[in-house]
Structure formats: structure tokens, C-alpha cells
Image (spheres, rainbow, N blue to C red):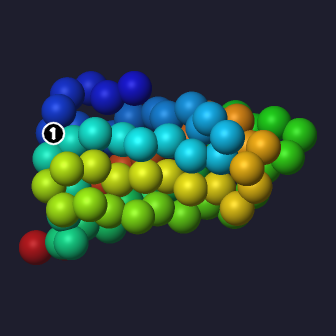
Amino acid sequence: MLTSTNSYYGTATLVAGTNLVQGSACNSNVVIFLSRKSSNNVPGHLSYAVTNNTNFIIISSTNADVGAVNWMIIKTQ
């Protein structure tokens, strides 16, 4: 769930181990913190990949992961 297009925090629910988060606040000058809000019986390790000024994707190491993930964007510059 996004609070706005340029949101700096929110919660995403993984589907088949991923979730695409839209928002132009994403670029190469950000750090994204991820933490589990809820997990299921197969939680994996979390990572992310950023597409400049478009979105970022949260990726679990387990395809069966359908847990909820809190995220927060910090601009580094």
C-alpha cells in the first residue's frame, strides 16, 4: 500500500515472493529498509532492486513467501 506516488514508507504484501512498489522517490540515491510485518510458514531472505524514478521490487529468496513487508526509503543525497 502506498501513501502517495512519492511515498517514503509503506507496507507491501508479497505474491509468489515479490511485490512491485511504484513511486518516483526511487532512484540510485536511496537506501530502502525492509522489515517483516507478518510472515508465513516459508519466509525467505528479503532484498530489493530499484528502477530509477519508477519503482522498486521487493524480492524474497523463497517463491512461496506471501508475507507482509514494511518498507522505508531514505534519500542519501
Up-down relation of residue 37 to residue 76 (above or below): above
Q: Position of residue 53 (x, y in %)?
A: 14, 55
Q: Nearer the viewer, residue 70 or 20?
A: 20
Q: Quadrant of residue 50?
A: bottom left
Badge 1 is on which residue? 6
Q: Quadrant of residue 13?
A: top right
Up-down relation of residue 39 to residue 44 (above or below): above
Q: Is residue 19 left or right of residue 24?
A: right
Which residue sits furthest right?
Answer: 41
Task: Locate the N terminus and report the quarter of the image it occupies.
Answer: top left
Which residue sits furthest left?
Answer: 77
Q: Is residue 34 visible?
A: yes
Q: Position of residue 9 (x, y in %)?
A: 33, 40
Secondary-structure class at tag 1: loop
Instruction: Count neighbours of disc 1 (C-alpha within 10 A) and say few if under 14, some if 14 to 19, many if 20 or more.
Output: some
Task: Locate the C terminus and report the quarter of the image it occupies.
Answer: bottom left
Q: Nearer the viewer, residue 34 or 26?
A: 26
Q: Is residue 47 left or right of residue 20?
A: right
Query: Which residue is depicted at the point 26% across and 60% down?
Result: 51
Up-down relation of residue 29 to residue 10 (above or below): below
Q: Position of residue 4 (x, y in %)?
A: 20, 28
Q: Is residue 8 left or right of residue 35?
A: left
Q: Position of residue 71 (x, y in %)?
A: 43, 46
Up-down relation of residue 59 to residue 11 (above or below): below
Label 1 sits on what residue type? Asn
* Numbered disc total: 1
